[in-house]
Image (cartoon, rainbow, N blue to C red):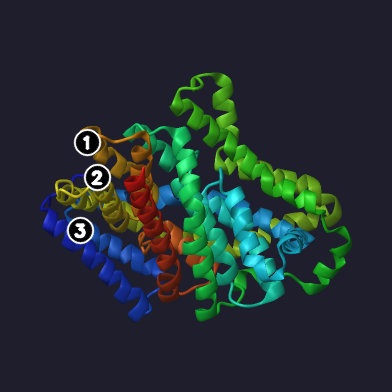
Amino acid sequence: MAETTVSDPTHLLLTGLGAVILLVILIIRLRVHAFVALILVSVLTAAVAGIASEDIVPVMMGGFGGTLASVALLVGLGCMIGKLLEVTGGAQVLADGLINRFGEQRAPFAIGIASLLFGFPIFFDAGLIVMFPILLSVAARFGGSTIKYAFPAAGAFAVMHAFVPPHPGPVAAADLLGANIGLLLFVGLVIAIPTWYFGAYLFALYAGKKFVLPLPEMFKHINSKAENSLQATAPSFATVLLVLLTPVLLIFMDTGLNTLQVSGAINGDQTWVHILRMLGKTPIALLITLLLCLVLFTKSLGKENVEKLCGDSLAPICGVILVTGAGGMFGGVLRGSGIGEALAGLLGNTGLPVIVAAFVIATCLRVAQGSATVALTTTAALMAPIVAATPGLSEADYCFIVIAIAGGATVLSHFNDSGFWLVSRLLDMDEKTTLKTWTVMETLLGTIAFIVAALLSVVF
């Protein structure tokens, strides 16, 4: 962390609050482009928070570059995969298969269930990007707001990523607090499913009626004549499922082996473990999936068309990547300023019940610096000595505390969260609508999970 010349917690907290308020004014009231507003506020926040002048730009670039490193490859590769599925009719084939099995009236539910299954090993951003063409195909077929179809999927990936091993956040928190990962897997699923149903699926049906979003412009580019010419070569349902399951299975190798390593079931220093985990890293998994798509679809599309389609898929995502990176920059500045630590320090000795304190501290860290994973792991580290010193906690209680932390790390996604900007730009939502929909859904998910975990801790 960069050295700061200001360490007064009150000053830091007021700086963080002022930064968020300034962003709201610039973006929503003054209509300054989000990319410009985030850069400007990042500079001002770093200066006011006391980060040394020579460290301001490195801290900003660190946050920007770190986010781009994790997002740009995923978005680029994912959009190429999505473009090929879309043009060949593969997205429509999968959409038709889901609708035939669940019925037209339950199309959002079908998409959400599929996303819950895919979300078991796959990360939030990668899963959402790969599923996006399917969401849009269903939305184009049945009409209505894209929120109705996108939010059940986004919520599914969010709850699986936050609450269920083998995702890195809950695995790291379990390791820090001494929770049993096998039991956490069961508890996480028990809590994640109803949380998704009430916080994402039902909310999506409500928000879809209130906020009618058309199909995003970046996905309205397929020539109808080209589509018609490819109808005869549309892939089978099994082929499309193979494409979607490939990154899921590959990523599961990484996350699953990581879980086994943390639990002590395997030796993580063995060569074969390193190789399999490397193949399961999300960028490599998506690259392998793209290569599979090239093998499957080049014959029917032609080499020149495939090359052109891959190139065309990258053009519309420049804004998505840059604004998402700027959101990561703002979050990096807040982390570097020590605002999150100031919040945690104030709340650490409040005398709240352990599970409530865990949720509150994680919430404050989430609001302060944006990253759910950072909030989750940092809170777990802060709570570890408190949990260890608390008598009478059962194995289940440790798991409930992990879920409470994950719930706090999920709520109130806003301008400093790269996921906020990813969803906003993919769905062509303005910032005000994103706050009224995505932020509310994330808050519902985190709060519902915490309430369920707290109630279960009383019972068990």
Q: Which quadrant: the N terminus?
A: top left
The first of marks 3 and 1 along the sequence is 3
Residue at which label 2 appears: 354
The residue positioned 45% from the left and 47% from the top of the image is 163
* Whole-number angstrom distance, CA of label 1 to CA of label 2: 8 Å
Taking the image as shown, residue 35 lies to the left or right of residue 340, namely right
Picture disc at residue 47: 3
Query: Which label sits in the foreground, 3 or 1?
Result: 1
Q: Is residue 221 visible?
A: no
Find out whether the residues at labels 1 and 2 contact each other: C-beta distance under 8 Å: yes
Residue 281 is situated, as x and y percent measured from the top left of the image, at 55, 38
Taking the image as shown, residue 232 lies to the left or right of residue 43, namely right
Question: Toward the viewer: 317 or 247?
Answer: 247
Residue 5 is situated, as x and y percent measured from the top left of the image, at 13, 49
Q: Which quadrant: the C terminus?
A: top left
Q: Is residue 312 visible?
A: yes
Question: Toward the viewer: 258 or 6?
Answer: 258
The amino acid pointed to by label 2 is Val
The residue positioned 60% from the left and 34% from the top of the image is 279
The first of marks 1 and 2 along the sequence is 2
